[in-house]
Each structure stands twice: as structure tokens, then as C-alpha cells.
Image (spheres, rainbow, N blue to C red):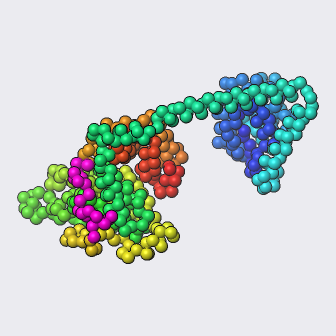
Amino acid sequence: DILLVTDGEIPDPPVPNEVFDALEYLKLRKGVEIHGLLVGKLESLPLSRICNKVHNFLHKYDLETILSDGQLIPENNQISLMAITSEKRESLGIGWNRQLSRSNPSMPHRTTRLFGRARYYDDDENENDWTESRMTSKKKRKGHRRHGGTEQASTDDAVDDAFLQSVETALLSVRAKVDDVVAAKAWSPTLLEKEREAEGTCWKYKSEITAAIDRVQEGLVERSEEARLVVLAMLSHEHILLLGVPGTGKSILGRRLSQLCNGMFFQRLLTKFTTPEELFGPLSLTSLEKDEYRRVTKGYLPQASVAFLDEIFKASSSILNSLLGILNERKFDNAGGQDECPIRCMVGASNELPDSDELDALFDRFLIRKEVNPVSDEGLFELLSMPQPGSSSCDTDMENMIPLVASHGGPNGKGDCDIIFSDGLDEVVKALSVKADRIKISQDVLHVIRDLRAFVKNELNVETSDRRLVKASRLLKITAASDGRGRVELVDCMLLQHCLWRNPEQQASLR
């Protein structure tokens, strides 16, 4: 309702304390709100335009009724309020700074400038001065009303008390309704257990998924979240980007993920000199004799189940298009046709963000993004106390398929290292996908997703594509399905902090 505009470099507060007291009093009496405070120079053209738009907006309302209260603009204050039209200015008795209009001949007579100027302020930088002074001023005003004994003061106090009481009553009513809605939507242990035992539920795979997470993070310190995310990416058929300095266990996560898939693992360190032959295989000499440009892809990226590409944003333009096709469509252009790629998940790693537009497309293909930091001081003690840090009894030489460490069973000392999913990984992924198609997203979650998109656009200056939001919503459904639930809950939205950021520093704001 009211927008204060001041000029120059001014401390807090930008206007005398009496004006703040008067505005607070007016808020209680008439429900007026202060939406903001603009600070700028008198000669600032952008500020002038803002003032014009503010006044044009407020001009639709009855300013005379608001200002004639007499409490908004005390006679003894040192604030000049302009941009009231000439007719209302005369009726309200507000002074007009004619020098301002003369200095700007282009300004129309019916000015549309709302400008409040503080002519006095205290240079003392003590932040407590304003609070103490304001409280003192309020006490003086209350004391004046209390001891003056005027009929008007008593009436004002009664109005204030009645207004505050009505506000408190309304708040209690709203809170009670909110509590009822939350209680109605909350999962009860009985309801959750019933849903997990229903036909078609994926709760029976919970123990196997947990065992897979334990397998991935065995021998690693402070990598529980990363292990959960790479397993989720595998189950969702999505790709994950691990951003962090070298030597933080990123390649180990990818290698162990391939063991869960029981498929081929492909790993490469990319440089700007990496050639297509190093990723997609050499040209077939036999095919060249038949005038066919075909690559031998066996043992290379197009035939891999899980891939780990280190320094992925150093990929050259010669391999970028083929890489995007494998990531998105899971197809590889070869000899004029398209070969199907069995890749379940690609784990990309980098210690820097993309620095060109052509790499932004590659960056967008990774739905899940996680910053991997070195272990903390507390975790360092645990890491250095381990006999073989980063090693697992189930680690194998991916080429010769022999154990790298003497095996004593699985991560928990029991079970076969080669078997995690008793029904097979394909069956688990299919069951989760079918269940995810039947899972509903509540209106509360939809509102959160919508608000998050607006937040990252307006506050973080990050554009979120429709494709990313669709894939992120399916990721939430897969998460709910793996927990045996039939709908996405608000707690699942915590995953979005790993899907919507452009810089790692933005994750905290998203969270």
C-alpha cells in the first residue's frame, strides 16, 4: 500500500523514527502495509521511472482517505512527499517542491512521482540506536495517550485492541484448519504398511536396493549420499554428474555400479585431443572395402552397460554429437543406421563446469548432479584408520574378472558378491517403471515444483527446461515406488536439490 523512496547514502533507518511509529499505527488502524523501501539519488532516471509506476498504481486508490488520517505525515517531520496530483495536494495541504518541476521541464503538471526524501539522519553506525529510539518513541506516544485522558486516545486503544484480537482469532482458526489438512494427508503406520503389502508393490525390492547401496559405498567414507544417487540413477535409467576435485572416489562409484549391472564397464579420461576412435571404436577395414563407414564398437562406449567419463567437459566437438545421441536416445549412428546402446547409466566426472554453449547441451543431459567434496576432518581419521581405504571385498579387475581383494563374502560378510537382485536387475527396473506410471503426484508437490522453477529462474537466473522437469518428476515417482508408496510426498522433493542447480553454490538455496 505504501512505498517509501529516499535519496542518498543513508543508514538504517532512512526516515525519522516518528514516521515509522506513525506507519505502524496506521497499519493497525487501517490495515495498510509497507511493501518495500527504495534508496537512490534524486537525479536517478531509473528511480524516477519506478516512482512514476508506483504512483500510477496507487493513484487508483483513495489516497485522500489514507493520508487524511493525519498520522502518516506528522507536521513536525522532515519528510516531503510528492507525486500527489495537484487537486489532492491542495486538499491535503502537502507542500510541493516547485524547484523539482522547474528543473525538469518535460515533467507534466500532473506529476506522477512519488518521492519521500529524508533530510535528517544520524551518522552513528550503532545498529541498536534505531531500535532503542523507536521503542522510546512508542513509549512516549503510549504514555501521552494514557495520561492525556482524552476521549480520542481511549477510543484508539479500544480499536487497536479489537483489531489485534480479531487478527489473533483469525490466525487460530487458520492454524486449526491447517492442522486438520496435514493430519488428513499424513501417512499413518497402518496405512503405509497396508500399501506396501498391496499387489504390485515394489517394497519387496527394498532390501536388495539397500544392499546395492551398501555394496557401492563399502570402503568409502562420507559417500553415502553419492552411493544412493548413483544407484537411483541406475534404477531410473538416468545419468549422473559428479563434480569435484580428483581423488575423491568418483571412478570407484562408477566401477562398482557396473558390477551391480553385471555388464560391460567403459572408462575413459577425456582431453581436448581425444579422438572418436577412443570412445566409439576403430573403423572396420572390412566394411571400408564395401564402401561402408562402420565402426567396430565391441568393447567401447556404444556397447557398455555403465560408463565413467572423467573430465567429460573436455570433450571435443568431433565426439560431442555422437555422445549426446548415446546419452539421450541411447542410439549410436553407425554406417548410415542406428545401433541400440545398452547403457543403463553414465557417470560423468569433472572438476570444472562447462564454459561454452555447445557443452551446455551435454551438461543438461545429466539429470542428477552432485558435488563431491574431500572427506571432512572427522572423516579423515576414519579413512586413514582403514587397512585398505577405498577397497571392497567385491572389487574385481574388470578386464580379467578376478578379485582385487581377498573375498570374505559381501559387504556385510555374507552372501555372494555377484548376486544382489534375485529377480535380475532388468526385472527390478521394469517393476519400478510400471509402478511409477501408476503413482500420482499430489497438488502440494506440484506447487513445490512450480515454485522451484520460478525460484531458480528469478533468483538464481537458471532456466529449467520442460524435459528436465518431466524427468525430475519421474525420478520422484521412482523414489516413491522403491519405498513401497503409491504417491509422491513432499519429502521426496529433497531430491530436486540435485537436479535444478547450475552452480554447486546454488544447491544450498534450493535445499
User: Visible in this render: residue 509?
Assistant: yes
Magenta stretch encompasses residue 265? no
Q: Position of residue 172 (x, y in %)?
A: 63, 31
Q: Position of residue 213 (x, y in %)?
A: 34, 58
Left-right relation of 288 to 59: left
Q: Position of residue 447 (x, y in %)?
A: 47, 37
Report the front residue among 353 and 438: 438
Is the residue 443 above or below the residue 261 in the image?
Answer: above
Is the residue 468 above or below the residue 141 in the image?
Answer: below
Give the residue at the far front of this rendering: 190
Residue 290, quarter of the rendered image? bottom left
Q: Position of residue 107 (x, y in %)?
A: 71, 33
Report the front residue among 64 and 234: 234
The residue lying at 36 percent from left, 75 percent from top is: 388
User: Which quadrant would the N terminus be assigned to in this image?
Assistant: top right
The residue lying at 44 percent from left, 60 percent from top is: 371
Number of marks in picture: 0
The residue lying at 9 percent from left, 58 percent from top is: 291
Report the front residue among 422 and 95: 422
Left-right relation of 164 to 279: right
Magenta stretch encompasses residue 410? yes
Is the residue 450 above or below the residue 240 in the image?
Answer: above
Q: Main secondary structure of the magenta part?
A: loop
Residue 272, quarter of the rendered image? bottom left
Which residues make up the magenta segment? 408-428
The residue lying at 32 percent from left, 58 percent from top is: 211
